[in-house]
Every structure is written in structure tokens, then in C-alpha cells.
């Protein structure tokens, strides 16, 4: 499969460390200042994108800080020049008319660099404690499909009349629309059958949680084969946690350190599991193998020497992954290491021609 040009992004630290919360090298800090400086540094290092996850309350432990995604995205849009800004959104928290207006505002502040990441919710307390309710898994996706169809059409500038099971919108138009393109990009997360159907019909990019190459290739083949009408071909992103060192042995030592620290978070993870819908495929996938990091983390296999990690990235790209949304710990130092050691190796492989890419894909 031919992938779009390769891009690298980072997860913003909106609710603290991605791997372990008791790491002396990564003190808990989900502040605006930390995230601002992190994303500005990522842009300077050459990263292409950042993902700002949305939670109203911390998904791991309620008394921990949690940065608000959409106000942070607007502020980041005004401070940056090049990096794509993706803000996650849970449809039940915002009426689609209001959200579409917010998205268009940030789109124009950023001069055409904004995107939505549609996530149909897995954390019960956020919705239940607000009195919103937490519908069954497939019902949440049905709601999300109707919700994004309203948002997408309004972002495109359509004067909308819409009557559905959840929304009735009459003669509604938003101005200004995007001053730079048709509308902000739409990313979709989730790997269940309703999620695959939703992204095929309404998304631009499908975010896949970190897992082995063969599994990712199978997911891409399934969704890429689904009807898209007149829409452009779907693109694909992968979440992954990176542990890279000069040698495989050094990387393994660093990985085992994080794994042992993550084990100390067992009480926190038990609370998270209790609050999570068991039908969420992401959580099922993450139980298959030991790992560190969220959204699949190190299950994608980006643990090893610099050359090994570069080769695995090239293999994922050959399978169709366009955007790697990356996690590190300690974040700033490892983000810089990746930019200095891995990205040049990946670019060199790309320049080496088809033979090197084929070797990566089958090796």
C-alpha cells in the first residue's frame, strides 16, 4: 500500500506522564505552561502534529490536574506557525453547532492547521457525574455519526437543515468558514465495527492504537476497502510509545525501568478499568501484551536501537501509516532524542529507494 508523506506528532501532556506516574525523571505536570513549552519545542524540532486529548476530569485519578483541550488548542494555535493542532472531542459534551463554530475559530486562528479527533467516549464518570448519561457502546457511535455529519457540513459552510434522531437544525449557517481550505480535518479513533463504519463514512484520518505491524496492516486493509463515495482515500495514523537507544540492550533496560515504574500505578489503573466501558476495543487490545504508555503504547514495537526503531517505522509506513503520534518518558528529553536520532534515519531510508522500503516491509 502506498502511504501519504510520513509525518511525526506528539501527544500533549494534558493529564501528566504517558507511561508511569511515579517516575522521578518525569514529575507530574499537566499545566498550560508545560504543554505550551512542549509543543513549541516540538515544532522547533520538526514535529508535524500534536494531539490534545479531551477530558473534563482526569481519567486516571480525579484529584489530579487535567488541562482543558479546546481552550488550550486555541492558545497553541496563536503561538505556533507550522505544527498541526488536533483537539479531541467527545460529542456528548458539545452541541454540534457550538463545536463547529469553535472549530472554525481555531482553524482561522491557526491559519488552516486545525483538526478534530472524534472520540466516542470510554470514561464513564465524565458523562455520568455530569448528568449526561453514558449510553451503550453502539448507541454512542450512532450519536457520534449524526453529530459529526452536522459538524462537518456546518464547517464546510453549508446552510444546514437537518432532522435526525438526536439533532434538529434549521436554516443554520456559520461564518466565516475556513479561510484556508474546505474545512478542518477530521480524525476518528476507535477500532470496533461501528467505529470503522464511522471513519469510512465521515473521517479523513483513522487513528489506530499501537499494536504489532501485522495487526495494523489488517485493520488498514479492512477500512481502506470500505466505500467512501466521492471522498478522497482515507489516511491512517498510529499511536506509539518510543524507547530508543544506541543499542537494543540499552533500550531494553530503559523499557524495563518504565515497566517497573508503571507497575506502581496498579491502584490507579484499577480505578480506570472500573470506569471504562468493557466494550471499548482499545482496552481489549491493550490487555494482550505487557506494555507501557497509553493507546497501545509500546505494543507497536518501537523499542530498540535507533536503527531498529527507524526500520519498524519505515515498515509501518509501507503498510499505510502516514502519521505517527508519539509518546515518550521523560518526554522532552526523549522527544529530542527521537528528532535527532530516529527521524534522520527514517528520512535516509526513504531516500534509499524502493528496495530498502521493501526490505523494511518484509523484514
Image (spheres, rainbow, N blue to C red):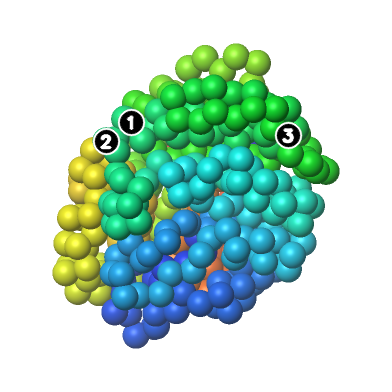
Classed neighbour count for the residue bearing mark 1: other residues with Cα under 10 Å, few (<14), some (14–19), many (≥20): few
Q: Which residue is mark 3?
A: 173
Q: Position of residue 8 (x, y in %)?
A: 58, 53
Residue in the image at 39% along x and 71% along y: 17
Residue 40 placement, left or right of 119:
right
Image coords of residue 122 (percent x, y): 32, 47
Image depth: mark 1 or mark 3 in front: 3
Figure quadrant of residue 154 = top right
Counting from the top left corner in percent of width and height, residue 56 is at 42, 61
Q: Is residue 229 left or right of residue 276?
A: right
User: Do labels 1 and 2 touch, CB within 8 Å?
Assistant: yes
From where the camera sits, is residue 95 visible? yes
Name the residue at the right extreme.
179
Q: Is residue 292 left or right of residue 71?
A: left
Residue 136: which numbered mark, if any? Answer: 2
Q: Is residue 214 left or right of residue 318?
A: left
Which numbered dot is residue 139? 1
Tell me if residue 137 comes above or below residue 79 in the rendering: above
Q: Which residue is located at x 55 percent, y 28 percent? A: 168
Label 1 element class: helix
In this orientation, which residue lies closer to the viewer: 215 or 68? 68
Q: Closer to the N terminus: mark 3 or mark 2?
A: 2
Q: CA distance from mark 1 to mark 3?
A: 28 Å
Q: Position of residue 297 (x, y in %)?
A: 36, 55
Q: Is residue 14 above or below residue 1?
A: below
Q: Secondary structure at mark 2?
A: loop
Earlier in the chain: of badge 1 and badge 3, it is: 1
Compared to residue 71, the image places residue 352 above or below, namely above
The image quarter containing residue 345 is bottom right
Mark 3, residues whose alpha carbon is within 10 Å: few (<14), some, or many (≥20)? some
Amino acid at each position: 500500500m502506498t502511504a501519504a508523506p510520513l509525518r511525526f506528532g506528539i501527544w500533549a501532556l494534558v493529564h501528566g506522564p504517558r507511561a508511569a506516574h511515579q517516575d522521578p525523571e518525569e514529575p507530574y505536570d499537566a499545566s498550560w505552561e508545560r504543554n505550551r513549552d512542549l509543543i513549541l519545542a516540538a515544532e522547533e524540532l520538526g514535529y508535524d502534529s500534536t494531539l490534545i486529548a479531551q477530558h473534563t476530569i482526569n481519567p486516571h485519578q480525579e484529584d489530579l490536574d487535567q488541562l482543558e483541550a479546546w481552550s488550550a488548542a486555541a492558545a497553541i494555535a496563536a503561538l505556533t506557525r507550522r505544527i498541526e493542532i488536533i483537539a479531541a472531542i467527545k460529542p456528548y459534551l458539545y452541541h454540534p453547532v457550538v463545536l463547529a463554530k469553535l472549530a472554525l475559530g481555531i482553524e482561522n486562528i491557526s491559519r488552516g492547521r486545525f483538526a478534530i479527533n472524534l472520540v466516542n467516549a470510554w470514561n464513564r464518570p465524565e458523562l455520568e457525574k455530569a448528568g449526561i448519561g453514558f449510553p451503550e457502546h453502539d448507541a454512542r457511535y450512532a450519536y457520534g455519526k449524526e453529530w459529526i455529519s452536522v459538524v462537518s457540513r456546518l464547517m464546510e459552510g453549508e446552510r444546514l437543515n437537518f432532522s435526525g434522531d438526536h439533532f434538529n437544525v434549521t436554516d443554520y449557517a456559520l461564518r466565516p468558514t475556513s479561510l484556508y481550505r474546505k474545512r478542518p480535518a477530521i480524525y476518528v479513533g476507535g477500532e470496533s465495527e461501528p467505529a470503522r463504519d464511522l471513519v469510512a463514512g465521515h473521517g479523513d484520518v483513522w487513528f489506530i492504537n499501537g499494536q504489532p505491524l501485522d495487526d495494523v496492516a489488517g485493520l488498514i486493509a479492512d477500512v481502506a476497502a470500505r466505500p467512501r463515495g466521492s471522498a478522497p482515500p482515507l489516511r491512517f495514523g498510529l499511536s506509539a510509545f518510543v524507547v530508543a537507544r544506541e543499542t537494543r540492550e540499552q533500550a531494553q533496560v530503559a523499557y524495563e525501568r518504565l515497566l517497573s515504574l508503571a507497575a506502581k500505578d496498579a491502584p490507579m489503573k484499577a480505578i480506570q478499568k472500573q470506569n471504562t466501558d468493557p466494550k471499548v476495543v482499545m482496552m481489549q487490545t491493550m490487555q494482550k501484551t505487557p506494555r507501557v504508555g497509553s493507546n497501545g503504547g509500546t505494543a507497536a514495537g518501537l523499542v530498540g536501537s535507533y536503527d531498529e526503531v527507524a526500520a519498524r517505522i519505515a515498515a509501518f509506513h509501507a503498510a499505510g501509516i502516514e502519521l505517527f503520534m508519539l509518546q515518550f518518558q521523560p518526554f522532552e528529553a526523549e522527544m529530542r532524542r527521537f528528532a535527532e536520532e530516529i527521524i534522520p534515519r527514517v528520512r535516509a531510508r526513504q531516500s534509499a529507494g524502493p528496495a530498502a522500503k521493501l526490505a523494511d516491509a518484509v523484514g
